[in-house]
Amino acid sequence: MIDIEKLKFDENGLIPAVVIDAESKKLLTLAYMSRESLKISMEKGLTCFYSRSRRELWLKGETSGNYQHIVSITADCDGDALEVMVLKDGPACHTGSDSCFNDKIYENEENLEELDGKFSLEGLMKMLVGRKIEKKEGSYTTYLFEKGIDKILKKVGEECTEVIIAGKADDKKETVYEIADLTYHVMVLMIEMGISLDDIRAELASRHVIDKKVKQEKMT
């Protein structure tokens, strides 16, 4: 831990603070802190910034209710910028958007293609949504969407059985294969029902909080 007096505030007594969602690692906003707002942030555990336009302190969420609960504050190597990891109660932007960074200025298509080639659950979800919208001929995913919820649920059930059989046989390789099949079909079901990965993350996170609370109660 370093003394905040060792930080390098600019000529206006401010230091830029990059705010990042601690769960998704998404960049939320770039704001500025003064020594006073930084101290308030540390005391309250909530982000408090200095508004350069209004020339006053503002506690994020005080009006909107979209508080940002601080996980950590880290200075960069020069001590003239801060990274603030937060758990947020709502949108970070005053427009109602999840992040203040939405308007693209430049994209490198070559690098985007390389990035798209790397697997991620988010990328798979995007591809599945595309199959539902574009109805690509010969696509198994499109076939599932065309057949509807009953067919999708039937496939989820079948894949559950396959996972059980592989697991019971203690066949790790086959179990991984079948879990991948099950995951794919569950994601198709999610899209069919309008369920996002964030919905699942939020549900798992709420259970984690409950488990933590139960554990604390047992210790008292």
Image (cartoon, rainbow, N blue to C red):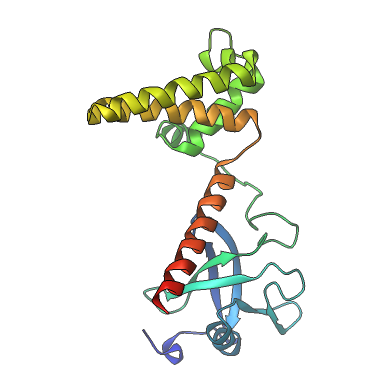
Identify the residue shown where x is 62% and y is 55%. 101
Relative image position of residue 201 (x, y in whole percent): 52, 49
- How many numbered discs? 0
**Residue 91 to residue 49: above or below:** above
Of the 4 image quadrants, the one containing the N terminus is bottom left
Residue drawn at (56%, 32%) of the image: 126
Residue extending farthest to the top is 138
Tell me residue 181's x, y (percent). Answer: 41, 25
Residue 216, image x and y in percent? 44, 73
Task: Decide which of 35, 73 is in the foreground and name it.
Answer: 73
Residue 196: image location, x then y, percent: 59, 40
Residue 170 occupies quadrant: top left
Q: Is residue 160 above or below residue 78?
A: above
Q: Is any part of residue 113 visible from this angle?
A: yes
Give 12 or 100, whichever is nearer the viewer: 100
Task: Give above or below for 91 relative to 123.
Answer: below
- Which residue does the image show at 67% across and 73% down from the upper left? 60
Question: Is residue 82 in view?
Answer: no
Quadrant where the C terminus is found in the figure: bottom left
Left or right of 160 on screen, residue 129: right
Q: Nearer the viewer, residue 110 or 202?
A: 202
As drawn, is 176 to the left or to the right of 74?
left
Determine which quarter of the picture holds residue 150: top right
